[in-house]
Structures are given as C-alpha cells and as structure tokens.
Image (spheres, rainbow, N blue to C red):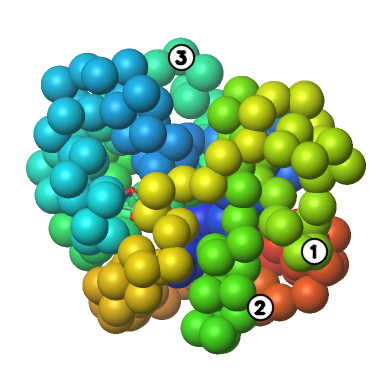
C-alpha cells in the first residue's frame, strides 16, 4: 500500500505511522526523521537543512523532494510505504505523483489528521522523543515509567529543539497555512480521508484503519 500521512506538527503523524507500519507491513518514511538523522551525523544534507528546521520553516522543496525520491527508490519501498510529513507543499505533491507515475504506480490513500491548534500546542510543548527508536512521550499524558527513559526501548528521552516553547508558535504560524493547498490538491484526487486526531491513540488508529479498509 502507498500511503501519505499529512497533518500539522503535533497531529500524531509519527505515532500513527509507526502503528500503521506494523499493521500494513510497509516502511514508515518520515522526512523529519531523515533530516534530523542527517543533522546528527553532520552530513551535507544535515548542514543544508539545520537552519530551516531551527527556525520552524519548511526546508526548500528541491532538497526534500530529492531525499524522498532516493528513499522511495530503495528496495524496501517497492511494495509500498507510509510517507510521514511529506508532501507539505503542492510542489512536493506533484513531484511525488510524477515519481509514482514513472513507475506505473499511484497513491492508495492520503490520510489527513486534523487537530485543533490549542491541542497541538499542548502536545508539542510537553513532548519528549526517544533518541534510539524515535517514540514520542508526553510529560503529562504519556509519561515515561522511568524518568528520562523510553517506555518502549529504554533509550534516552530528549526535547526536540523545534519543540521549545518559543519555537512552537513560529512553526505553527508558518506551517499550518501551508497545508491547505496540499489538502485541496488531494481532495481533487479522491483518495483523501480527513481523520479527526483527537482522543486516545488507539481510537485514532481505529479511524485510520477503517479509512483504509
Ligand atoms: P516533522 O518531524 O515532520 O515535524 O518535521 C520537522 C521539520 O523538518 C519541519 O518543521 C521542517 O522544517 C522539516 N520538514 C520535514 N518534512 C518536510 C517537508 N516535507 N518539507 C519541508 N520541510 C520539512
């Protein structure tokens, strides 16, 4: 299955994409994770993108499109993928369609997760990520059993630079408006499902799974 998962920062894309990956058996491809990984390793891509991410703005289309094209050409994506956080612009959506068209493929579903802005801010400001497996936690409603340690793998938890309180507002202002044309683009294709992302994680997952059935 070829699935795209879109939504504003804090909508739960990463969490739900990980659950879906286990259910569907195709890899989660997160552009945010790939860029953070490049920054950790100090690669050219990491250096090119660091500034944009710290400011909460989008990384230029040409860079992200290249990263995704390469990743989707890898063997484990031959039978499908769950794109998490891509596309975020119409230009990216067009490039993805074009790459799939060249391969004689198309998207099976676009899952757009919607969450009110106030709730997004609450989620992001308390979020802590695992350095080893990437699993998100929350200091109030998804607490680590051992302080500072991941519930899944025991890895070290940290707060993302762009989840700092002063950076969240910037990110919201810059990214929420950007999504509207992408949603309109996919609405026209007939594969768009708009899924309310509020409520317990498993309930939201149930809605996503029902949309794919
Ligand atoms: P995420 O982990 O999806 O919240 O992404 C973190 C940051 O990575 C975003 O705030 C952007 O700066 C950058 N980023 C991730 N995906 C994209 C994309 N598709 N287009 C442009 N920038 C992106």
Numbered tag placed on residue 141 in the rendering: 1
**Neighbourhood count class around disc 3 (C-alpha, 10 Å): few under 14, some 14–19, many 20 upward:** few
User: Which quarter of the figure has residue 50?
Assistant: top left
**Neighbourhood count class around disc 1 (C-alpha, 10 Å): few under 14, some 14–19, many 20 upward:** few
Numbered tag placed on residue 196 in the rendering: 2
User: Which quarter of the figure has residue 87?
Assistant: bottom left
- Residue 175: x and y in percent read 31, 70
| Residue plotted at (55% across, 85% down) | 118
Q: Nearer the viewer, residue 55 or 103?
A: 55
Q: Nearer the viewer, residue 1 or 169?
A: 169
Using residue 144 as the reference point, say whether residue 6 is left or right of it.
left
**Neighbourhood count class around disc 2 (C-alpha, 10 Å): few under 14, some 14–19, many 20 upward:** some
Q: Nearer the viewer, mark 3 or mark 1?
A: 1
Q: Is residue 72 above or below residue 181?
A: above
Secondary structure, mark 1, is: loop
Q: Which of the marked residues, 2 or 3, is nearer the chain's N terminus?
A: 3
Using residue 72 as the reference point, say whether residue 202 is left or right of it.
right
Mark 3 vs mark 1, CA separation in Å:
38 Å
Numbered tag placed on residue 75 in the rendering: 3
Q: Nearer the viewer, mark 2 or mark 3?
A: 2
Taking the image as drawn, is residue 23 in sight? no
Answer yes or no: do the residues labelled 2 and 3 have beta carbons within 8 Å?
A: no
- Residue 135: x and y in percent read 66, 39
- Residue 6: x and y in percent read 47, 61
Secondary structure, mark 2, is: strand
- In the image as oriented, which residue stretches furthest toward the front? 147
Secondary structure, mark 3, is: helix
Q: Which part of the image, by quadrant, shows the C terminus?
A: bottom right
């Amino acid at each position: 299955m070829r699935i795209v998962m879109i939504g504003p920062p804090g909508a739960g894309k990463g969490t739900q994409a990980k659950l879906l990956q286990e259910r569907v058996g195709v890899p989660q491809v997160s552009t945010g994770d790939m860029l953070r990984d490049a920054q950790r390793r100090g690669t050219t891509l990491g250096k090119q993108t660091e500034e944009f991410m710290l400011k909460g703005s989008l990384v230029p289309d040409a860079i992200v499109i290249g990263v995704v094209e390469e990743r989707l050409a890898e063997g484990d994506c031959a039978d499908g993928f769950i794109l998490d956080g891509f596309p975020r612009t119409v230009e990216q959506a067009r490039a993805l369609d074009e790459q799939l068209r060249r391969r004689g493929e198309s998207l099976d579903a676009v899952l757009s997760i919607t969450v009110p802005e106030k709730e997004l801010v609450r989620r992001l400001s308390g979020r802590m990520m695992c350095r080893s497996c990437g699993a998100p936690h929350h200091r109030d409603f998804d607490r680590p059993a051992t302080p500072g340690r991941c519930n899944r793998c025991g890895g070290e938890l940290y707060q993302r630079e762009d989840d700092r309180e002063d950076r969240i507002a910037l990110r919201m202002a810059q990214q929420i408006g950007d999504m509207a044309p992408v949603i309109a683009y996919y609405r026209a294709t007939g594969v768009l499902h708009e899924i309310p992302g509020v409520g317990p994680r498993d309930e939201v997952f149930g809605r996503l799974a029902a949309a794919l059935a």
